[in-house]
Image (cartoon, coloured by chain):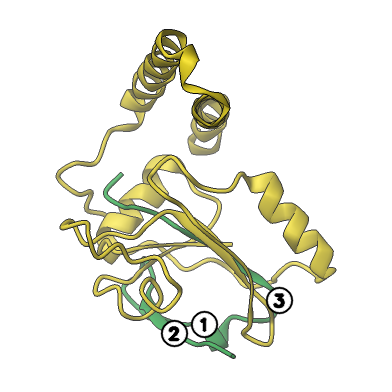
Chain colours: A yellow, B green
Amino acid sequence: MFAISADTAPMNAAVVEKMALPFPMLSDTGRQEAITPLGFADEKDPREISRPGAVIISPDAEVVFSFVGRDYADRPFEDVLLDELGALGLPPTEQPPPELGEILPGDKAMPLRGLGPYYRGAKFAALAIRGRHRNLGDDFGDDLKGYVEMVDRYLEALPGVEERKA
Amino acid sequence: MAINFTVTDTAGKSWTLSDHLDSAAVFTFQRGDF
């Protein structure tokens, strides 16, 4: 598994180091190599970043799964990706991850210790909004329920990050 | 249609998809600056 962003290699290295990511991050700063060709560019966003989402590419370089998120909170859960991979019946890669070079977080990067309060704040804000607008129908409720589930998964994963860094 | 691309890894080195497809590969796309 790999992650791709439009950030620089040092910024990606900072994320890998901060989150003790067990997978590499790759940099497509111009968004022309992978982000745009695979459908993840958002031309309306002046920040020139990638939309969230995922693709699975087969060994013969075909895209066999693609999910392009509507916004930062819209991305497939890992069990969806694992199910799609399992269906391919392929062995795991034996390649080692790339090394980390220069580590230089971006100006807006959040420290690891800030993530727990950030996620909890986002979760309770979503719950409050859901409580205020129960009349908006199932689509709204389902979206908020999915958002809260995503945040809960992130909160559950945080202790694991600390363990990997220890 | 087969695809290929070259991006940059965290060591600052070029990373080309076709060099790394010994199995299926999952790519998650991140907004960045996290």
Identify the amino acid type marked 1.
Leu
Q: Is residue A73 left or right of residue B19?
A: left
Task: Indicate whether A96 appears above or below A148.
Answer: below
| Sooner in the amino-acid sequence: mark 2 or mark 1 | 2
Task: Please tell me which residue is depicted at 48% across the width and 37% down the height of the picture.
Answer: A165
Percent x, y for residue A2?
A: 52, 63
Q: Amino acid at mark 2?
A: Phe
> Residue B5, which numbered label?
2
Label 3 is found on which chain of the structure? Answer: B
Going from N to C along the chain, the mark reached first, 2 or 3, is 2
Which residue: 36% across, 48% down?
A: A15
Q: Nearer the viewer, residue A1 or A149?
A: A149
Do we see residue A102 in this rendering? no
- Please tell me how crowded label 2 is: few (under 14), some (14-19), or many (20+) other residues with Cα within 10 Å: some
Are marks 2 and 3 in one subunit? yes
Q: Are marks 1 and 3 on the same chain?
A: yes
Q: What residue is drawn where x is 40% and y is 9%?
A: A132
Question: Marks 2 and 1: CB-CB under 8 Å?
Answer: yes
Query: Around disc 3, counting alpha carbons within 10 Å, would you say few (fewer than 14), some (14 to 19), or many (20 or more)?
Result: some
| Residue B21 in view | yes
Residue bearing mark 1: B17
